Each structure stands twice: as C-alpha cells, then as structure tokens.
Image (cartoon, rainbow, N blue to C red):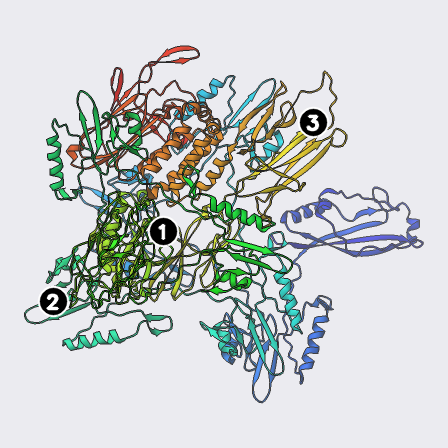
Amino acid sequence: MAPVTMILRIIIILYVTSSLKMQSLSHAQTVSEEMLGVNTWHTTLPPYMDETGNNLKQEQQSNWKSFKFLISIKINASRQMVQDRLRTLLKGYSFPYSVSQNVIITNVNLNTTQPLKLFKYITDIKINAPRGAMIDQLRDLIHKQKYPVCIKKTLKISAVNITTVCVSNSNKSCCKCENQYVWPSEQCSKHGVCGPNHNDTCRCITSLPSDGPFCRRPPVFAAPLKSFKYNIDIKINASRDAVIERLRALIHGQKFPTCVKKGMKISGANITTVCLSNVNKTQCKCENQYVWSSEQCSKHGVCGPNHNDTCRCITSLPTDGPFCRRPPAPLKSLKYTIDIKFNASRDVVIERLRALIHGQKFPTCVKKGMKISGANITTVCLSNVNKTQCKCENQYVWSSEQCSKHRVCGPNHNDTCRCIASLPTDGPFCRRPPVFAAPLKSFKYNIDIKINASRDAVIEHLRALIHGQKFPTCVKKGMKISGANITTVCLSNVNKTQCKCENQYVWSSEQCSKHGVCGPNHNDTCRCIASLPSDGAFCRRPPGLLKLFKYTIDVKINASSDAVIECLRTLIHGQKFPTCVKKGIKISGANITTVCLSNVNKTQCKCENQYVWPSEQCTKHGVCGPNYNDTCRCIASLPTDGPFCRRRPVFAAPLKSFKYTIDIKFNASRDVVIESLRALIHGQKFPTCVQKGMKISGTNITTVCLSNVNKTQCKCENQYVWPPEQCSKHGVCGPNHNDTCRCIPSLPTDGPFCQRPPAPLKLLKYTINMKINASSDTVIERLRALIHGQKFPTCVKKGMKISGVNITTVCLSNVNKTQCKCENQYVWSSEQCSKHGVCGPNHNDTCRCITSLPSDGPFCRRPLEPPTTMAAPTITAATTTLAPTTTAELTTTTLATTTTAELTTTTQATTTAPPTTTLEPTATAAPTTTTLAPTTMRAPTTTTALTTATLTPTTTTALTTTLIPTTTTMAPTTTSVAPTTRLAPTISVAPTTLAPTTTKATTPTTTKAAPTTPTTTKATPTTTLATTTPKPTTKPKPPTTTPKPATTPKTVTTRKPTTTPKTETTRKPTTKPITVTTLKPTTMSELVNREMSLAIDETYDASLNNRNSDKFKKYKADIEEAIHNSYKNVKGFISATVTGFRPGSVIVEFFIKSSEEIKTSEEISQAVYTNMIALNFNVDPLSVAKTDKIDMRKRDTVFPEQKMTLSCPDINRIGNIDWRFQGEKIQPSSLYSFTPDRLNLTVKSVNISNNGRYECLYNTSTGPQIVWDRIDYIKPYPSMQVPNNKAYKCENREVTLDCCVHSDYSVQWVQSIKSSKIDLLTCRTEQFKITAESSCAKTFIYTCKLDNEDLSGFSYSSKSVELVVHKPIEQSPDSPVTCNNDIYGFGKVGDKVVGDCVKEKVGFREGECRSDGFWVTVKDTCVLRIIEQLQQESQGLDAETLTDFVDKLNNATINNEGEIVQSEATVSAMVEILNNIADVTQTVMLDEVVITNFLSIVDVISSETVKPVWEQLNSNGESQGNSSQLLNAIESVIKATSNSNFNITSPTNSFLFKKVTTSEDFNEVLKLNSTAAINIPGIASSHKNVTITAVAFSSLGNVMSARNRTDDLNTTENVINGLIVVVNTSISIKNIQLNFEKLRDSVTLNNNSVNLWNPQCVFWEFNLFNRTGGWDSTGCEVIQVNGNVTSL
C-alpha cells in the first residue's frame, strides 16, 4: 500500500490567568505509530471544577482568560491497519477532554490526504549572442553555480546546461550539440548531418530546427523486453499419410523465425509425434530428435528399441500427458571422496585390509546411480610409548598446514611431507599431492612514450640509460617492464623534418605513402619519412612474413592442329618463371602434362615427359603403350571424370631385405667327399634363387675336422679363423694371429664354427703440442739431441705408441726483440704471419719467423700441400744406388713405348746417363702386368730400356701413382692386390736409396716391373709432378674409372731387353740407363669433388659403422653402382664413392668426382631414386643434396644454462633456411630463436641433451645444400658436492671440508686462496678449525664456487655450507644422550639430519641419532660420481653416439664394480642409464659389440654379490619398480638387434644370447648353471622365415622379485628355481614349449630346510602392483614335472 498522510486536527482550550505568562505551543506535532499504540491519555480537571464538573470557584471565573488553538498533527502511515488503530483509539475518548489542569481538548477530527505530487520540468531557453565569447562566459557562469538553486518555496532549479550552439554565417549553418547531448534521429534525417552519427543520433546538423526540441541527452535504451518461450503442441487428425507428408514439406519450406505480430514470433516448428491406428494395432512414433519419456514408455508399452529409459515408439496414444519430447540432458555426475577411520591393534589387520582393497575390482556398484570408483589406504598411524608417527601411503602426502602444525618426521617436498609426528584431530588425512594451479595469465602491453628533446645529447643519454638498464625490471608486484627501446627519432629544423626508425623498426606502408619517404624502402615499409605523423603511429617492428600457399591448376585447351600445341609448348619453354600475376600471386612454373589426339580411327591421350597416368585411369580407359609400376604413359580415351597426367608417384618402400648366415654340418668318411663338395660349391653360380624372395648369395666351407685314433684337428678354410674363446678352450694346433687361430685339436660342441676374422681395431692418430720453458739454448740443444737419439715408434702402453717427436717452434726473447722461428719442415700459417709480423722470408703466404709469441693460436705447422698443377707430361727418373749388401726389393717398371728418337747411352765412371725417349701422346692405354721380386743388379754389359723407379703415394702431397688396371704381386710375402682403376694417370719418380735391410712394400698402388718381352703398348697421356718421394703409406685411394682405348700410335719401335738375373752376390752398385717419356698434359686442377648425401628409409644398423662388415661392403658397392648409373650420362662425371653411413633413418654420405661442377637437378635426383629402387633401397628424391661439414661456432666448451649461437654460411642461397636438430625441424620456441634472416640459431639455455647434429638447409643455384656441424662439447652439470650443514661440539678440532665437481670443472673455496687439489679427483679442501675459546655458540658459512669467472650467476655456480658450533654442554649423569661423527656431526637422540657422501660419490645420506649414542643411516642416495656423470650424458644419447657410450659405460662398470654392487643408489642410477639406452635403440639396430657390452653391464648389476642390494630395492616402495625397468630395458635392446645371427655367452657363464633365423621348427637347449630347452613347433608348416631371439640368465633371479599376481607386494612364499629366459619372435607364435631344469629341491629358511613344491610356469607382467611388475601364470601351463619342469 502506498503511504497515506493523515491530518489529526485537535482543538485545545487553554485557560490562563492574567498574571500567567503564555508558553509557546507547537503548531504541529508529529505522533508516531508507537506512541499511539502504547501511550495512554491522562486527564486532569480544570481548577474550578470538581470531579462531577461543578464550578467550585465561580468567584474566580473572572480571573481566567480562555484561548482556543487548532493543532494539526501530520502522521505518515503506510498501512490501513495503522489508520484503523488510530480511529479506534480516538473513539475510546469523550470530549471535551482535559489534558492538564488548564488544557482541554474539545474535539479531535481525523482527515486523510494524499502527499503533494512532485513535478520535474526541463525548460529550454534560447539565447542569441553576437560573439562566441559570450557563450564561453555563459558556460563559465553555469559551471560555477552551485545546484540545486531555490527560486521560491516548492520551486527549485536542479541543474543548468548548454545543450546546443548554433553558428550561422553567409556560407553555412551548423547546430552542434555540447558534450553529453545529441540530436534525435528525426532531426538528423530532417536537417542533414555535418558530423559522424551513432545509433541513429548525431552531434551536428546543418540548420536550426524551428519546430522541434534542441539537443537532448542520448536515449538510455530501455532494458529489452523479457523474452518468453512457449512450446505449443498442436494435434492434427489426418486420414492419409499424404497429409502428413504435405505438412512436413510445408514446415521444412517455411523460413523461421516467422513473425505473428509485434513482440511475438514463431522460432521453429517440428512434427514430434505421428500416431497410426488401424484394426490391428496402434503405434505412436517419435520423429527424429524426439523420444517418449520413461513414464510414457512404461505406461503404454514399447514397440521399438529404448535407450536411457526413453523410447521412440509406444503402442497407444497418450491422453493425459505430453507428446514426444527432446531427450533429456544426461544426469550430472557428482564425485565424493569419503574418509573412513579404522582402529587396528596389529599390523596384520592393516595388511589384510590392504590385500582386500587390492583384490577388489573397481568400480563397484553400491546401488543404482551410485558406485565406488576406487578405495585406497591413505594414512597409517602407529603409536607406542616412545613416539607417534602418521605416515602417508604411496601417492599421498600431508598438506603443508599439517606438516608445519604437527612436526615432520621425514623429508618434505614442495611444502608437503610424507610423515608427521602426531595424529591430527581437526583436519583431513593424507591427500594426493596438489596439482598446482595454472599460473596467472600474462598480459603484454606495448606503451609508446613521446619525449621532446632539444639536443642530440639528450637522445644519446637516453639511449645509454636504456642499454645500461637490466630487463625485465619490476615496477610492482605482478607488473614488470620486459624491455625498452627507442623506436623513432624525429629531427626538425627550418629546412626539413625527418622521422627515422631505430634498428629493427620500420614505418608502416600507410605512413610511408602518406608522409613521403626519405630513404630506401623494403616490402612496402620504410625507415624514414619526411614529416611527423599526427595520428599517433610511431615506428613498429616489421610485420611477419605472409604464409605461402602452393596450388596446382589444370587448364584444358582445345586445339585443332598439332602446330597449336607446338606453339604453346614453345611459349611455355620461352617464358621465364616465376611470373608475377599480381601482388602476392605468382606462377612458379607451367608444363603441358597431357596431349589427347582424336580422329575417326582412334583416340590417344599421351603424357608428356615426367608425367604418367595413375593406375585407375590405365585400367579404366585401356593402355596404348608400355606401363610401369601400375602407371602408364598413354590411354585409349579421354577421361571425363578424373585428373589428367600426374608426376610419377613416390613408391612405397620396397620389402626389407634380411641376410642370414646358416651353418650346415656334414659327416664324411673320406677326403674325396670334401673335395667333391668343394668342387660343387666352386662350380655353382651365386646368387642362387631358392624361392620367390629368397636366394643364396654364397656358400663356403668354413671348417674341416679330421679325426683318427691319434689326433683330432679342426682346421679353418681360407679367410676363416677360430675365435679366441675356442682357441683358448680347445688348444691350438697351428700358428695364431690377433688371439685367433686356424687350427684347434678338438671339435667344439657348444659354439660356432670358424668365422671370418674380426675387423681390426680402429687406428686413431693424435698430434699433441707441448710447451717447454728453457732459460738457455743449451737446454734446447739437449732436448733436440734427446729426440734425435730416441727410436720411434716408442710404445707407451698396450695399444698406444708415440710415432715421432719433433721440435716445431723455438722462441727467443730479450730486451731488444722477440723472435719465434720454425724448425725445419714447419712454417707459420698466413694468419699468424700477418698478425704478428714477419722477421724472415715468406713463401706461399707462410713464413718461418714472426716477431712475437702467439697466445691465441697453434704453433708452427707443416706447410699445407700446394694445389696440384700438372706440368708438361714427363716421366722423370733418377739413379737408384743400391747398398753393397742389398736384400731389399727393387722397383722396376718396363714401359713399351713408341720411339721417335735415338736412344743414346753414355757411361762415365760408374754412372750411366739416362736415355731419352719422346712419345707422341695417344688417347688409349693398355693393361700392364707388373711383378715385384728381390733383384741384384750386375754391372752394365748391354744397353737396356729399363726404368728404375720407386712409386710411393703419400698423404702429404697431391701425388697419385696410376697405371691402367694393374695386377701387382708383392714379394717376399705373396699378397694379391685388387686392380685399381684411375683417370688421368700420373707417375712420379724420385731418387731413392735402398737401405741395407729389406723393406716390405705395403702400398697397393706401388708397382715394380721385371724385364718382359717387348710388346706394342699404348700409353695414356700423363702428367708428372717433380716431387720428393716420401715414405710409403697404406691408405687406399678411391677407385676411379678409366676410359676405353680409342686409338693406337702409327709407328712402333721395339728394343730387345736384357734380363737381369737374380743372384745373392754382392756387387758394386751401378747405375742403369733411364727412359724419359714425354706425354700430353692433363689439368688436375679442373677436377671437382662434390660431397653429397641421401636418405634411405630404413632403420639404421650399427654394423654400418664397421667398414669391414659385410653389410657395409654390400651397401657401399650397391649404392656406388646406383649413383654411378644415375650420373654416367652427365657431362664431366668421373666417379662416385660412398664414404660412410650415419643414423637418421640411413644417411649415405658420398662424393662425386667430376671435371666440372655438376648441379643436383630434379632429373638427377629422380634417376638416383629409380636406380636405388631397383636395388631395393627406398630413397626420398628430395634428400639428395650437397653437404658441407663446417664449424658453426668456435669449438670451445659450452656449459649448462649458457647461450649457444650457431651460424649458417650464406653462400649463393636461394630462398629460406630451415634448421634441423637430430633430423627434426627446429621451430622458434622458449628454447630456440632465430635472427630475422635465419642465418643464426640461438639455443637459449643449453644442457647436455642439446649435443648432437645441427643442420641448416637451403637451395642454391647448383641444387639443395646441407651445412652441418656436430656439437659434442656441451658439458654436463658439475654436480658440485660440498658438506651438508652440520652441528659440531664445542671442542678443539679440525674439520676437513671437501668441494668436488666433475672433471670438466675446477673449484675453489672463497674463504681461502691456498686451497689445494687433492687426489685424482677435481676436489679442493679447506680446513675449518674449531677452538673452545672462540668458536662456541657461533655459525660459520663457507662457500665453494667454480673457478671459471664466466660461469658465475648460474644455478650451479656455487654452494655454501653452514657450520654451527654448539655451546659447551656440562656432562652429568642426567645429561641427554648425544651422537657425534664426521658424517652427520653433532646431534641429540631422535634428531634426523642429512650427512655427506664420500668424495667419490654424489648425493646425500640421512641419519638418525639413536639412544645408544650412535648415528644410524636410514637413507643413502650416494651415487658414484662417474656413474652420475654418465647418467647425465645418457640423457643426450643418439644413434651416432650410442656405440661409444655403451662401451664407455661398460668400462666404467668393470673398473668400479666393487663400489657399484654395494650401493642401492648407484644400481638404481645404472638402471636409469640402461633405460635411456633402450629408448635410443628404437631407431637403430644393434650389432654384436653393443649387445655384448650391454649384457656385460647387466651381468655386473645382477651378480650374486649385488643380491642384498636388490632385496633392499625390491622391499622399498620407491624403488620396487627398478627390477621391472631393468627387464624392460633388456627386452627393448634384444628387439633392436640387427638381422645378423648372434651367439654370445658371458665369460662368467651368467647369460647366453642366441639369435637365429630359420624356416624349420626350432628346438634349442640353453645351458648355463642349469638348462632351459625351447621348442617352437609349427614354423615349418607356416613356410615362413622366423627370427628367434632367446636370452637365458642365471643371475637375473638375483634381481627379480618372486612375487606373483596372487601375492602381496612385499611378501611372497615363491622362489625362482630355474633360468630366466627372454624369447622374442618375429611373428606371432601360438605355442612355445619350455623345459626348465630345477636348480634345487629345497631352500633354507630361518635355518631350516624347506622342500620346494608346486612348480609354476610364469611370465613377467609389467602392469601388476601399480606398474612395479610381478610374475603371472595366466596362459602358461605346467604339463609335466619330473627332474625338469615342462610348461606350455
């Protein structure tokens, strides 16, 4: 009810004596509702009346004066009840009514009135003003006035505003609205707008309205009307289906929403339910998207399928409810976590509860709509007299509040803990670790600040301030400045204005075109404009590059004659591509793909070059030409429904080729059988096809064993040897070599037969510079004499020798000058000569003396080999002097030549002048057969065309010794050297003096000729270098191709030679005549070696690292053949040589030798692809590219968290650069960033995992280019180890503080500059002295830091230790028990502190002070430092470094076996390393070396001595999964073995590895300390080759827990009683039968012998026990038990 005002009118008579002063009475009095409802009215009679109203003092009446007042009382009452209550009160009184002695109320009237209405007026006042100043003055007056202003009672002005200002002159009229005012839409449209409008309103119109309002406040749009949505069901009766279909069509054809009337529209209409009824049945079906509710389905019956209690069809028409409705939304799922508290007096109850929970299957349904998804024990509290501990189960922790409140009894992590010292009564129990909330969202703002400066110095000062400021800079919490840059500098004077952008900033294209450009522009942006923008935009960073899209468009052209097509072909070929169509669109190329010719007889659609019809079109339209790989070049009709010719498809990878070596054993009673077999094998042509996809590539007899009564001998055939194991095991009956032998005196029964000799160890050569300071020349001379007197090579230790020592550089310095001179055969490089100044002659940019000692580069080096410049073709010879007692080889070469001049011989004393023969150059050459033999020369008796020469290739000159295919036999050791084929043959001859002792020639290309019968010989043009012949080397030269003979010389003159017989007689040395031949020159400098690579899509096999492996040799030969066939028709091509392989699928590295630069075109890449496919190599044509190995940065050490920048050379680059790491493309991220041109890649915070191969890829004019570098010098973290914080007793003593790091670092204690290195470790020691007088009750802090100043500021740069010395403790019988030792320091009973590891280890130990006064170690995480460093390195492993790393790990394991097998933490670290190795093996196939090393490591950490360690690990919740992880790593590595057959047995007989490929049923016995037989039937019937890998371990039982699926996690009654066998097959095998020999029949348990029974066949299930693993017998059945156990 609205408030009502009631007027209460009261008439009061007041009697006052004449002497009485009249009091002021209120005109109106307000009476509250409470007063009316509570107070009572008191009456008092006048003084002249009694109670009955009689006048007692009439005589005094004349003295009283009477006043009459009318009093109005205003009462506001909002309820009718108040008014009624007031009326009732008034009716209870009679009037007149005496209020007091002299006051009487004569009457009271109650009137009800409504409150006055409030009106608000807006008054427009129009003022004419001749000047704008008057308007401004009026504006000021209004703004200064205070409002509201009262004009008169009940009238006031609440506010005054100017709304409209109209300005009019002869040209125009404008009526503008003041702020906050607008013209309504009617006025805007009526009078015209002279400014922007908004929401149909405007601020300015072009004339003054005469008929409407002025500017008004913008309309406040009323709240939108509330929208109501109704679903209306309409029931329609129809006698025919056609009516329903018609209705359905009408609804679907209607556009919605449809307006019915204003404010009402139909948003949609759908048919929901269709009911059909006849005599037989009634069905009410729902339309699509509608269903019957569950109530209707159950009430009326269902005539179709139902879903979620709803249905689509019911059997009667409902009369009482809704029709079909949309399906209800699914019910919301709520999840509750319920804590249940159990009291248990024994641990066994808790264990039983734990077992019940683990055995229960979840989720478990409680009732409909409610289920238990899981149950876990979270908290276990144990309490006794001494202590209370509440520990969390796995995966649960105490919250930080509980940890701080109840005290922690174990380690904590992230403010949470696993154990507290009392039971909480007020909070939750253990909970899962918190999932940290997502970080607050970060917003980034760019703020432009404009600064006016009158001088350039101010700008420079500002620039210096910004550059000197460290960013980010924190402004306040949650706000920081990440960077500041000057973007724009504007300079203006009388002449011009220029606004220039700073580096990395540009003006946008709009600003450049608007203000004019005063400098160069790029991509529509510019760096300088000619005026200052007034609209706010300054320089900005250049916009990112637009994304590039590539489209292939087919265009169909009809032509009536071939000439049109030829003309089109010519136009396309003559067009230069790419061609720009418009901005941002260009045509990169155009090709004719398909030409269709049709006439009366036939239609043919042929593909142009490089295009083919797909297989679908070929089969559909018919082929009119040859086809290839299901594609064709010509079809017999024009397709109307598919694509035209397309480029040849890239075919899928060919089937993988596997190579197996099979040993077959034959028994023969006679030698003739063996000879017959040998003859059969030699007569057989290989490869021989066995069946489709299987062929025998070769067969050899490897071993022949002969046995009789006297002896047995097993001899190896040629090229085969017994391995060292067999030689040492069975004894040797012949010479041995490199621990192998050719004959043993018995037949092996348990191992392989003769094998090919192992590849020789790789030879590495190092050059080491040593700097020696000497005070006098005598010392240098003495050193020179010592070196010259030493015999080289000198053996340092096995496998290491010093091949030679030379003084390279001697520096002499005094007051006047410094000179650094090079010894003989050494020079300073050109860089050092130009940098330090030359003090002697120089040659070829090198010098022998410089004027200062370099501090930043190498010392003198051997001079670089000069470029090979082929001089006039000559064969130069000199005399060879033979010592008097020569038994050495004499190199003699007889050349059959075409003679065109006389041969003259002049003998003077003992020297015979060489005859000179000049040959006409010819273009052909003939083979020359040369034989080497020891020869003794007689005194000359006849003139012989004999050339004496020593031909020795060397690695220090560009010298090549080449004959046309040459067969060479070297003596005295008979060795055949394969023919070598070379182009541009060169023979270099130099004087050689043969020593008195015999020197064996080992260079394959060195040839010597004995006298031969004269023949007509065609010589090849050669070029001779006059060089000094160095010592022979054995480095082979790559083969080259020799062209076929073409022409022959016209005249041939032959001279009968004189044979020099062999003799042992020592004679006086003589000199033989020499033949000098002049041949046509060839320029060797024109030869080009182009390093290339390509990628084969197959898993990398580690045997490709071994150049002597069969696979390496086969791949090298096949690929060289394919590449040669691809390039053979290319102009200038000479040869192709494969130099090696590397991982990344399989990357083939090779080089192309040519006489001119060869481009890597698409045609060549396609040819390589085709020829490689033919050899079963799947190659990506795009991977064929030129490769260059460079140093992308200075090869200095990079440490963790540093920034590393790599640079890519910009050489003839076309297009963008892509970067890759380990074959994966690098994208900008938080780790990687690029410069704008992508020439530089920055790795922002490196660690050891960033070691690897980096590549930058781009196109050049000669084809794709890959520039790469392998980064292998990022070091691991130093793992700085300092003592942990400790407390010490107050007593006189010294404490040793050791600070240790990895060997790549050095450290020092900040407190002392006298720290000394100790032992062989990188440790420094500091002595901390405690004195009872001055150290007690004090804290001391010592800091150890890295020596390298460049490594300051990183997370690992330093560590500190806090040492607390306690106050002295008075000893008394009641003193508390304390513990004190060097590991944990000083503490009281119950204290838990962290202690130190020994300095050879990294980590910490945790100890507890016990009541007996001794510290007890309760946790030990100390890991051997060498293993911890290898653990870091394993995180950056890749396929290239895997082999070396496994070898390195194996050596470290062997050398530190004693420490490893005693440390749980070190064994756990080894398991992690092996898992990291297993991860890498997913991309590589391993060879026998890696497998052997890996299993040797497993052998060490699973030996009998490490069994107690594994028992502790398997009983500890945190490490229970380690054994399962080790087994998983073993399985992964076994699966990654290469296709070769293996048979490896450990020296300790603890494991046996066997891998075979067979098509027969497999039956093998694995024998170690017991046996395990494997029988796999069904292989022969499958007609497949099956690869079987079987590994047996006798020691792995020490590692694996015996827990079974039915056991508890930590307790089991089972025992592993046999070998552990790992079997892997290449195909799925249904049945494998295993037969195990039992190790024992009983075990000792608690000093009692317990018999073993109930054997089980089990396999390891990795997912059991929360993925810690366990044995499972599911699917494995024991079928027989006797002495052995057979299972299936």
On residue 1289, the disc is 3
The spot of residue 571 in percent (x, y) is: 24, 76
Give the camera-side residue of 414 and 873.
873
Counting residues from the N terminus, which is met first, the one under dot 2 or under dot 3? 2
Give the camera-side residue of 1189 and 738.
738
- Give the CA separation, mark 1 to mark 3: 73 Å
Would residue 1635 be found to the left or right of residue 1242 on screen?
A: left
Quarter location, residue 637:
bottom left
Q: How crowded is mark 3: few (under 14 residues within 10 Å), some or many (20 or more)?
A: many
- Can you identify the residue that label 2 sits on? 604
On residue 1031, the disc is 1
- Name the amino acid type tagged 1: Lys
The reply to whether discs 2 and 3 touch (Cβ–Cβ < 8 Å) is no
Would residue 1026 be found to the left or right of residue 637 on screen?
A: right
- Name the amino acid type tagged 3: Lys
- Give the CA separation, mark 1 to mark 2: 70 Å
